[in-house]
Image: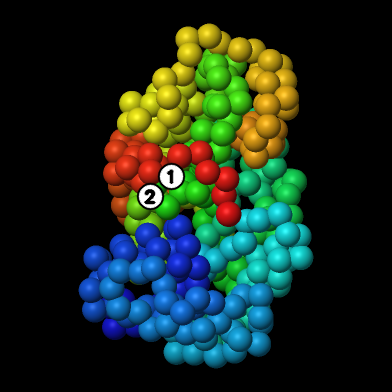
């Protein structure tokens, strides 16, 4: 695949930057065509930069010309409903139209398990849950998935992503822990997590790999197969000095929600529930089809990102 053309959107983002780093290490001769609204991507290795914006469909004209692979990693996850629609739904549809017009043979699109909406969710396979998004971001991303599937692409729904560059998951945990300073309902909640570099390996395997990976279409879950228990994640973050040690006291769920509601902060009840209660999904199929090992799991990877987290603390995402 190193002699072929790979187009990457979202390359300046959290996951996209990790994917470019991995591609540069795996295929040094590969020069991805990177679509970006900014002057230069935060990327390792050489890239061919193309100015384009998913929110501006005319700017996408010709961006997939001559390409063999499209890695669609761009999304908007804020609260602006209009921008969600412009980027995640209409923008993805325009990009897929360009990919189809150019005859791109392999499309890999990153989505999110947030499309399933409120839990609890416990070990569901793809197809066992009906998506029920509750936010403009997740609703528009689900709409974007339909365009990818219509183009014959592969949709990877990821769980919560950890690692250097994470500006949501661990900051949200820090904000919630400050407002609810106890163990949350026994700390027993299980959620699907993935380290950003492991997710990058998985995306690259589907983009460049042969065998079953080359022919994969439809929807797959894309995170580590083993869910992470909330108390284990909090303990691991405390061991790395990212969060303070959790007090020994255990609060029932009703008291946790009361404390969250009465203490100022930015994490919503919906977000707190996503972090603290069961939201995990089977993901063995993706790693099997990609032909790669998922690795030891996100808790074992935290040490690499801990200095980055410690430097930033509980900041509100921008």
Q: Residue at x 73, y 25 (%)?
A: 262
**Could you tell me how far apart the alpha carbons at marks 1 and 2 are, in whole angstroms?**
11 Å
Q: Secondary structure at mark 2?
A: loop
Which residue extends farthest top?
249
Quarter of the image for the C terminus: give it. bottom right
Q: Is residue 272 above or below residue 125?
A: above
Q: Residue at x 24, y 79 (%)?
A: 29
Residue closer to the observer: 66 or 262: 262
- Please say whether residue 18 is visible from this viewpoint: yes
User: Percent from the top left, x then y, of residue 16?
Assistant: 44, 63
Residue closer to the observer: 107 or 261: 261
Residue closer to the observer: 290 or 159: 159
Q: Which residue is mark 1?
A: 312
Q: Residue at x 46, y 33 (%)?
A: 227
- Please say whether residue 288 is visible from this viewpoint: no
User: Percent from the top left, x then y, of residue 112?
Assistant: 58, 51
Q: Residues within 10 Å of mark 2 (few under 14, many from 20)?
A: some
Q: Residues within 10 Å of mark 1 (few under 14, many from 20)?
A: few
Q: Residue at x 55, y 90 (%)?
A: 62
Earlier residue among tags 1 and 2: 2
Q: Which image quadrant for residue 151? A: bottom right
Q: Which residue is mark 2?
A: 164
Q: Is residue 102 above or below residue 278?
A: below
């Amino acid at each position: 695949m190193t002699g072929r053309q790979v187009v990457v959107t979202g390359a300046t983002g959290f996951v996209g930057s990790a994917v470019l780093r991995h591609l540069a290490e795996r295929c040094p001769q590969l020069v991805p065509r990177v679509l970006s609204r900014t002057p230069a991507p935060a990327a390792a290795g050489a890239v061919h930069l193309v100015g384009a914006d998913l929110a501006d469909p005319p700017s996408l004209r010709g961006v997939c010309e001559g390409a063999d692979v499209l890695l669609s990693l761009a999304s908007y996850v804020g609260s602006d409903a209009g921008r969600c629609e412009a980027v995640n739904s209409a923008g993805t549809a325009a990009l897929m139209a360009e990919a189809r017009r150019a005859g791109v043979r392999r499309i890999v699109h990153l989505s999110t398990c947030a499309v399933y909406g409120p839990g609890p969710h416990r070990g569901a396979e793809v197809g066992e849950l009906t998506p029920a998004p509750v936010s403009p971001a997740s609703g528009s991303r689900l709409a974007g998935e339909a365009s990818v599937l219509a183009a014959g692409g592969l949709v990877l729904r990821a769980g919560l992503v950890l690692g250097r560059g994470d500006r949501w998951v661990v900051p949200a945990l820090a904000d919630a822990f400050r407002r609810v300073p106890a163990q949350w309902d026994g700390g027993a909640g299980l959620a699907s997590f993935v380290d950003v570099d492991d997710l990058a390996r998985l995306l690259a395997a589907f983009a460049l790999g042969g065998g079953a990976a080359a022919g994969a279409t439809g929807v797959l879950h894309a995170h580590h197969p083993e869910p992470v228990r909330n108390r284990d994640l909090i303990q691991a973050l405390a061991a790395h000095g990212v969060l303070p040690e959790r007090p020994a006291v255990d609060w029932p769920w009703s008291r946790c929600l009361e404390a969250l509601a009465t203490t100022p902060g930015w994490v919503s009840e919906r977000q707190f529930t996503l972090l603290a209660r069961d939201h995990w999904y089977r993901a063995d199929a993706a790693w099997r089809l990609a032909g790669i090992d998922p690795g030891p799991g996100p808790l074992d990877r935290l040490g690499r990102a801990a200095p980055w987290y410690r430097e930033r603390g509980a900041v509100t995402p921008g």
